[in-house]
Amino acid sequence: MKTYFSTNRVVATAALSLATITVFFACKKNNNDANSTSNVVATNNAIASISNESAASAGFSDVFEVSFNGTKDMTEARTSTASQEPSVQYGFEISYTPVDNTWPKTVTLDFKNGSIGLDGKKRSGQLIITLPHPFLVANNTVTITSTNYTVDGVKLVGTETLTSGNLTSALKYTQVISGTVTVGDTTTYTYNSNKTLIVDTDGFKGIGFAALKYPTGDSAAITVTDTLVKAWDCRWIGKGKATVVRGKLTGTIDYGNGICDDSATVVVGNYTKMIKL
C-alpha cells in the first residue's frame, strides 16, 4: 500500500466499511455486561472518527498534491500555464492573474461540474491558490482555498496554508488546515490540522496532529504516530499509522508498510478489523 494525504477512495467505501464494522462490533456485545450497549456505541463512534480522519486527511492532501503539481512550474522568470501533464493528470483547467511576469499571483484550478483525471479520481469545483512567490521559493506562504471542491464524493470547504522553510536540506512545508468535510451528504464535521509535509520525487510524507468536531459538540483528537506516506503514483495512503482518541476510547489506523493497495487495519480496544479505504 503506498500513500498519505491524497483524496482517496477512503470515503467512497467509508460508509459501507463503517456499516460492516458497526454490525461486527454489535455482534460482539456481551449480554452479561450492563455497559455493553454503551461500549458498542463508543467503539463504533471511535471507528467512525477513524474513517472521518482518513477522509479528511486524504481530501486535503489531494488539495495539496493537485495545487503543488499544478503550479510548481510557474517561476519568477517564466509565467505560463502549468505544463499540460498536470492538467490532464488531475482534470482541471487553469487560469491566473495577473498574466504578466509579476507577483503575487492568484491561480484557479477549475474542475467544472465534474472531471475525471488520469489518476482515476473524480473532482469538481475549484481550488484557488494565492502565490506571493512561486511554490518552490523558500520562506514563502501559499494559501489554497477550496471552493465547493469534491474528490471521490468527499466535499472539502476551507483553507490550507503552506509555509516553506529555507529549503536547503529538503522541500518541507508546514501545512495548516481549517475547514469542513462532508461525506456522502450525510456527515459533516469541522477539521483542523497542523502537519509537516516533506516532498520528494516519489511523493510526500506527513506527520503532525488534527482535530475533528461534530455538530453535536463531540470531538476527536488525532496524532500521526508513524509518518504517513503518499506516493504520486498511488491513490491511497500506503504507509504509516495514526491514533484517534474519541471520548474514553483510543483507536489506531495502520496503512501498512508501503504497498499500494486500498486496505488498512483498524484497532479499537480488543478488536481488530481490516477495512477498505
Image: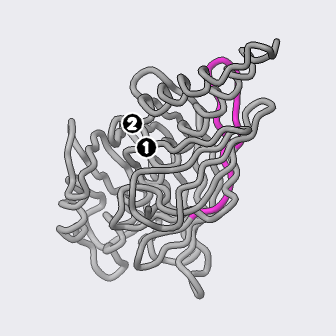
The vertical placement of 148 against 38, above or below, is below
Q: Nearer the viewer, residue 152 or 96?
A: 152
Q: Disc 2 residue type? A: Thr
Expressed as whole percent of the image width and height from the top left, the position of residue 76 reads: 37, 78
The answer to whether marks 1 and 2 mark residues whose Cβ atoms lie closer than 8 Å is yes
In this image, 70 relative to 49: left or right? left
- Which residue has dot 2 on it? 13
- The residue under the point 27% across, 73% down is 79
Q: Nearer the viewer, residue 103 or 201?
A: 201
Displayed quadrant of residue 271? top right
Q: Which residues are magenta?
A: 206-221
Displayed quadrant of residue 241? bottom right
The vertical placement of 169 against 174, above or below, is below
Expressed as whole percent of the image width and height from the top left, the position of residue 240 reads: 58, 61
Q: Residues within 10 Å of mark 1 (few under 14, many from 20)?
A: some
Q: CA distance from mark 1 to mark 2?
A: 7 Å
> Quick check: is 3 in the magenta stretch?
no
- The residue under the point 44% across, 38% down is 156
Q: Nearer the viewer, residue 97 or 273?
A: 273
- The residue under the point 40% across, 65% down is 68
In this image, 49 relative to 68: left or right? right
- Of the image marks 1 and 2, the number of the one nearer the N terminus: 2
In this image, 195 relative to 148: left or right? right
Q: Main secondary structure of the magenta part?
A: strand
Expressed as whole percent of the image width and height from the top left, the position of residue 48 reads: 58, 31
- Which residue has dot 1 on it? 276
Q: Residues within 10 Å of mark 2 (few under 14, many from 20)?
A: some
In this image, 44 relative to 83: left or right? right
Q: Disc 1 residue type? A: Lys
Which color mode does the image show?
A: one colour
